[in-house]
Amino acid sequence: MADALTRDQIEQFRQDGYLGPFALCSPDEMARIAARLDADLFASEPPQQGLYQSRHLDNRQVYDLCAHPAIISRMASIYGPDLLLWRSHFFLKEQGAAEVPWHQDTNYWPLEPPLNISAWVAIDDATVENACVHVIPGSHQTVVPHVRSPEGMLFAEMADMEYVDTTTAVAMELRAGEFFLFNERTVHQSAPNNSDRRRLGLAVRVTTPVVCVDHRRLFPGHKVVVVSGEDRLGFSDAADPPD
């Protein structure tokens, strides 16, 4: 695999819980993709409350982003050749958009066991000024309890900050067309967007066939799609990629 990770990169991911940034495409190519997304998806129905669910199931352009070899071959280096795309969503932060609080993704997800690797793909440039994602290295090594979020946060629950040390947080600034990887317990956050530039990103959620995804709990009608190898276990309902 041309984009396979090195042993040192795999070890860094295991230690830190995240890795990157990597290039998926050039900024110019992503600008063309963003224009098509704006025209095809968001012109008639803008993302609500900062997210837009699993359009890889019915939109080939979104699927091709999620299943891009630059992403999937790196994920396969860590979790093996058999991979299932079970969810994707767009996070849009316009000027004034609310904070996404510190959290671990597994607090919200219907996975058993809770095993996932995510790619966060920058559709627009993501900087500190327009609310890029921040991650805490090594935070995936502890399960953090979650509590109710204060009013004004984008998520109803957040990590209990008594268990989170933000002094080592890293700002994952990305150019359009870049992405980074992180696992299901890496504590992360994005601040309010106080700039005059929007920040659109695509979160790609991938697991393995040993995991049962109970889409009925949160995403009725959604199914997994095999993006690498095969699913010989069939624990989760599956669908074909869109035409």
Image (cartoon, rainbow, N blue to C red):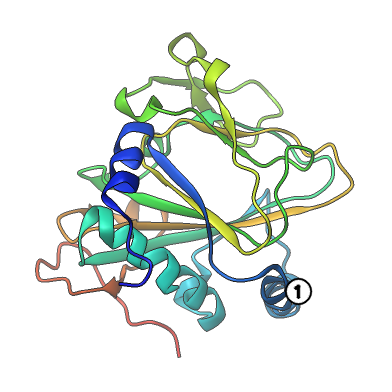
Q: Residue furthest right?
A: 196
Q: Residue furthest top?
A: 162
Q: Nearer the viewer, residue 164 or 223?
A: 164
Residue at figure coordinates x 14%, y 56% from the top left = 210
Position of 7 relative to 152 (above/below): below
Which residue is tagged 1?
Answer: 44
Position of 190 relative to 95 (above/below): above
Asked whether residue 213 appears in the rendered view, the answer is no
Q: Residue furthest bottom?
A: 243
- Based on the displayed image, in which of its 4 quarters is residue 184 positioned? top left
- Based on the displayed image, in which of its 4 quarters is residue 167 positioned? top right
Position in image of residue 134 (x %, y %): 59, 34
Figure quadrant of the C terminus: bottom left
Residue at figure coordinates x 14%, y 68% from the top left = 234
Position in image of residue 232 (x %, y %): 10, 71
Q: Nearer the viewer, residue 128 or 103?
A: 128
Callout 1: few (<14), some (14-19), or many (20+) C-alpha neighbours within 10 Å? Answer: few
Residue at figure coordinates x 43%, y 12% from the top left = 163
* Residue type at tag 1: Ser
Give the side of residue 6 with respect to residue 118, left or right: left
Q: Nearer the viewer, residue 232 or 217?
A: 232
The secondary element bearing badge 1 is classed as loop
